[in-house]
Image (cartoon, grey):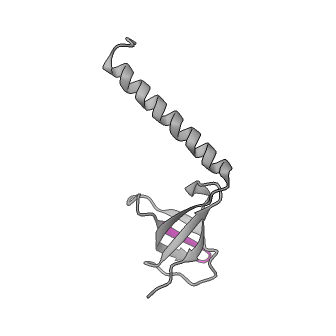
Amino acid sequence: MNINSKEFARFLDEAIEQKTKAVIKRELASSGLVKAWVATVVSVAGNLITVKVPNDAVNTITKKNKTGQVLVAGDEVYLFSPSGDLTNAFVAVAKNKP
């Protein structure tokens, strides 16, 4: 690969971006910060609820309902993750309805 080419420049930009994101994610995870997301309940099955997060209109995820509240489709909830990763998040708080 020619190091003077635009293709190499794009490759280098992408590699730097990926590495920077990985370092930031690792540092945030080790800092003890809790990350939160607002999600909309799509369906409920016992203690598991399927939610949709605003930044991903296509995919849904299923999480444990740890709120102690009865939730229905359309409710909004807060997902929390001690590791800062959505795959490790759980539903901790249901937003109050007006």
**Does the magenta run of residues contain 62?**
no
Quadrant location of the C terminus in the rendered image: bottom left
Residue at 57% from the left image edge and 84% from the top image edge = 70
Q: Is residue 64 above or below residue 33?
A: below
Residue closest to the eye, 26 or 31: 31
Residue 57 is situated, as x and y percent measured from the top left of the image, at 38, 60
Residue at 49% from the left image edge and 81% from the top image edge = 72
Residue at 43% from the left image edge and 78% from the top image edge = 74
Residue 28 is situated, as x and y percent measured from the top left of the image, at 61, 49
Residue 33 is situated, as x and y percent measured from the top left of the image, at 63, 57
Q: How many marks?
A: 0
Residue closest to the eye, 74 or 80: 80
Q: Is residue 84 above or below residue 7?
A: below
Secondary structure of the magenta portion, mostly? strand
34 to the left or right of 15: right
Residue at 51% from the left image edge and 69% from the top image edge = 50
Residue closest to the eye, 19 or 63: 19
Residue placed farthest to the bottom in the image? Answer: 98
Quadrant location of the N terminus in the rendered image: top left
Q: Is residue 12 above or below residue 89?
A: above
Q: Say which quarter of the image contains residue 64.
A: bottom right
| Region in magenta | 46-51
39 to the left or right of 9: right
Residue closest to the eye, 41 or 7: 7
60 to the left or right of 88: left
Residue placed farthest to the left in the image? Answer: 6
**Does the magenta run of residues contain 47?**
yes
Q: Say which quarter of the image contains residue 79.
A: bottom right
Residue 48 is situated, as x and y percent measured from the top left of the image, at 59, 72
